[in-house]
Image (cartoon, grey):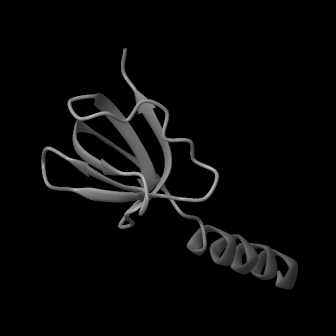
Amino acid sequence: MIKIFATASLAALLLAGTAFAAETQGVVSNYDINTRMLTLDTGETYVLVEGVEPGDLSTGADVTVTHEENSTDATAVSVKQ
């Protein structure tokens, strides 16, 4: 019984610390290479985290931004061709 409770408690703790990824699609209205800040046409802004390559983030590009829920740190950006 104690083993079951301990296992369930550990599982609950691990799940509580799990971050969920979200994706946002939009059109680039601005990308500042110095601050690594990406602004979409919706007004949403994201900062590309260390290691994320901006690729071809030009104004008007159709992009998908991957980020953690409730965060503006972009963990990936893909430009639609």
Q: Position of residue 55 (x, y in %)?
A: 49, 33
Q: Residue at x 20, y 30 (%)?
A: 60
Task: From the viewer's perspective, tell me whether residue 72 is left or right of residue 68.
Answer: left
Q: Residue at x 48, y 41 (%)?
A: 54
Q: Residue furthest right?
A: 3
Q: Nearer the viewer, residue 37 or 15?
A: 37
Task: From the viewer's perspective, tell me whether residue 54 is left or right of residue 37.
Answer: right
Task: From the viewer's perspective, tell me whether residue 7 is left or right of residue 59.
Answer: right
Q: Residue at x 56, y 42 (%)?
A: 53
Q: Residue at x 57, y 74 (%)?
A: 16
- Position of the N terminus, as image quadrant, is bottom right
Q: Position of residue 27 (x, y in %)?
A: 21, 35
Residue 63, compared with residue 35, is above or below; it is above
Q: Residue furthest top?
A: 81
Q: Nearer the viewer, residue 58 or 1?
A: 58
Q: Nearer the viewer, residue 59 or 2?
A: 59
Q: Position of residue 81 (x, y in %)?
A: 37, 14
Residue 79, compared with residue 8, is above or below; it is above
Q: Position of residue 52 (x, y in %)?
A: 57, 47
